[in-house]
Amino acid sequence: MSAHGERSPARAGAAVSAAEPTGGARARWIGAGYAAQGLGYAAVVTALPMFKERQGFDDALVSVILLLVVVAAAGGSLVADAVAARWGSRFALAGGLVAVGVALGLTTFRTPTAAFVAILMAYGVGLGTVDASLSMQGVLVQVRLGRSVMNRLFAAYTAAAFVAALLMSAFVAGGAGAGVAVGTAGAFAVVVAAAGWRAYEPARTVLPALAGAGRRPDGTRRIVLICGVLVFTAFLADSAVSTWSSVYLHDSLRAADSVAPLGYAAYQVAVFVSRLAGDHVVPRAGRTAAAAASLLACAAGCALVAAVPSVPVAVAGFALTGLGVGVLVPLAFSAAGHAAPGNSDEVIARVNLFNYGGALVGAVLLGLLSEPVGLRAAFLVPVLGLLLTLPVVRALRALSPPVPAPA
């Protein structure tokens, strides 16, 4: 205390500093954001049958609505870019989570078709905003900690998706209905936005364009293209397995109703395991080797599905694909952020757009090919895409130095 009973500036600064969240606390709250995103998305996907029945939609209209949601999510990624450039990505993350939470809450009520579609599109904007801003925050907290944590952050998303599926099953079986599970996910998103606000990374990265030229001196376009192609291909494989694995096992291989979901379950377990290990494996192996191995694992998994018409082999193939996808997605976002430290927020927002392109192609193209050639042969599409992406991996080495290995 000073002679006047007031804190000295040095002590006041120390108190403020002591009150600041640690890097580990920031990482945990950003992980909670990933969990909120995974919980909400899985709740929406598993509630689609309820939405369809309650609103009186047919399959064609559901497909159109899902397309609109994807387009809205791409727009949300651009919103995250604009907000992050002006105020910082924590504003985009908190705002996106609130938008997701409110939209999820509104979906639990029966509304006219136009209003319901508008609500889902608002959810899509929030979804895309959160997708992009979470990766921005993840890269920033990695820099603060000096070690790789991106895989563990994505693992929180995967784990929460499991929880959402269990909640949906429990609430529906107990008679509460799917709406309660969706509402719970929405409430969780709002709570995480409010409670985690102070712990989100406050930094922002903006690199001004060259005066009078409108160009950037850091090779941004090349970084976006290289990492974007990896994200596109990863989500091509992810969407193919997520959308069609159960259908393939049930319709093509005549698996029992209780067995058909096992392909997707094995895939998700493998994604989760690979993400838990990724922060230790990738820094030691190097991004180039890890990316190549991930692409080859994904390709081998989908090739197994296409080559051998057997339920156990297909389930193993889906699991192998999950091992590759689990590492590839966080690796690509992490590489993008570290390659452009001066404007990582903008780069990640642009790379995130490739997510939705890959998801659309994986879901739609396999569906279109299922009639003329069958789903088994259609799984060669991701194999081809993954193998064609291999030459891009060599460019990763020049983007940035390796991430430091965890302590």
Image (cartoon, helix red, strand yellow):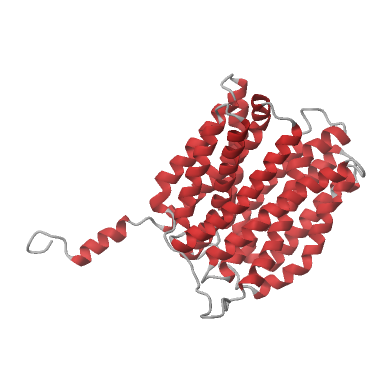
In this rendering, the answer to whether 378 lies above or below 46 is below
Q: Residue furthest right?
A: 372
- Residue drawn at x 26%, y 62% as measured from the top left: 14
Q: Position of residue 74 (x, y in %)?
A: 62, 53
For residue 245, side relative to residue 352 (left or right) = right
Q: Position of residue 358 (x, y in %)?
A: 72, 53
The quadrant of the picture occupied by the N terminus is bottom left
For residue 236, side relative to residue 221 (left or right) = right
Q: Position of residue 81 (x, y in %)?
A: 53, 60
Displayed quadrant of residue 178: top right
- Residue drawn at x 60%, y 73% as measured from the top left: 401
Asked whether residue 281 appears in the rendered view, the answer is: no
In this rendering, the answer to whether 371 lies above or below 7 is above
Q: Position of residue 15 (x, y in %)?
A: 26, 59
Displayed quadrant of residue 22: bottom left
Along the line of sight, which residue is nearer the eye, 22 or 185? 185
Along the line of sight, which residue is nearer the eye, 33 or 74? 74
For residue 137, side relative to residue 38 (left or right) = left
